[in-house]
Amino acid sequence: MTNRYNVEAVKSRTNYMDGRVSGPVILDSILERGNITIANANTVGYKGQTLGMKSATFAVNPDIDVVNLGDYYVQLAASDASYTYEACQGRPVVTTVSGTGGVAGTLVTFGNSLMVTPTATENTLADRVNQKNHAIEAVKFFAMEYHPVKVKVSAEANVAVGDALTYDVSSAMWVKDVDGTAVISCHVATADGEYVGALFGPHFAVSQA
């Protein structure tokens, strides 16, 4: 059975499991910043002892002014098989806007530490996701609501990040909708009954290179 995760960055005590009563959609999200390099550093500590320490560096280090985070926009990350709802623990995956990927929201926080600091350099996306080696940031999405939904894929196409969804009454699950825009999946799914996080009523803006 797939877990359901509450990833609301600002949680409501009156509706704790399923989200806000009102207000913006602010979610704890994975900010994808590429490979992580681990380097050793020696620090002189108490009584001149040399202390071995490790530092983590992302491949992507955007120049962001934390005083004006509302000026820094994000888009849903390009779909990848690793981005399942369970592996991401319900969190959407975003990147800073580039090219024509569109605008999904803005950063609310930046510079948070890794969820789990790797012990060695991570060069694959799958390893970073599975081992939870990624930065978690709060993101304000341009949408009305975020909710986990079960999807049906056996008689339809698999669901990818960014796919539109429509509700299938006969199965009581959601399916891929090539013509829809009102509900957008934030995760991938390849089996019936899997959850994906879905943005309801998203208002994504177009971007250009």
Image: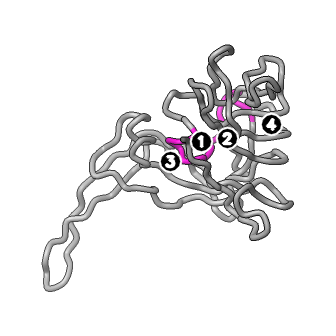
**Would residue 34 be found to the left or right of residue 23 on screen?**
left
Element marked by disc 1: strand
Q: Picture coordinates of residue 98 (x, y %)? A: 65, 33
Front tag of 2 and 3: 2
Q: CA distance from mark 2 to mark 1?
A: 10 Å
Counting residues from the start of the chain, the first of labels 1 and 4 encountered is: 1
Q: Amino acid at mark 2?
A: Gly
Counting residues from the start of the chain, the first of labels 4 and 3 encountered is: 3
Q: Residue at x 54, y 35 (%)?
A: 83
Read off the residue under disc 2: 197
Residue range (magenta): 85-102
Read off the residue under disc 1: 93
Q: CA distance from mark 4 to mark 3?
A: 24 Å
Q: Residue at x 54, y 59 (%)?
A: 111
Which class describes the residues within 10 Å of circle 4: few (<14), some (14-19), or many (20+)?
A: some
Secondary structure mostly seen in the magenta stretch: loop
Are the residues at dot 4 and dot 3 in contact (C-beta closer than 8 Å)? no
Q: Amino acid at mark 1?
A: Val
Front tag of 4 and 3: 4
Front tag of 1 and 4: 1
Read off the residue under disc 3: 61
Are the residues at dot 2 and dot 1 in contact (C-beta closer than 8 Å)? no
Counting residues from the start of the chain, the first of labels 2 and 1 encountered is: 1
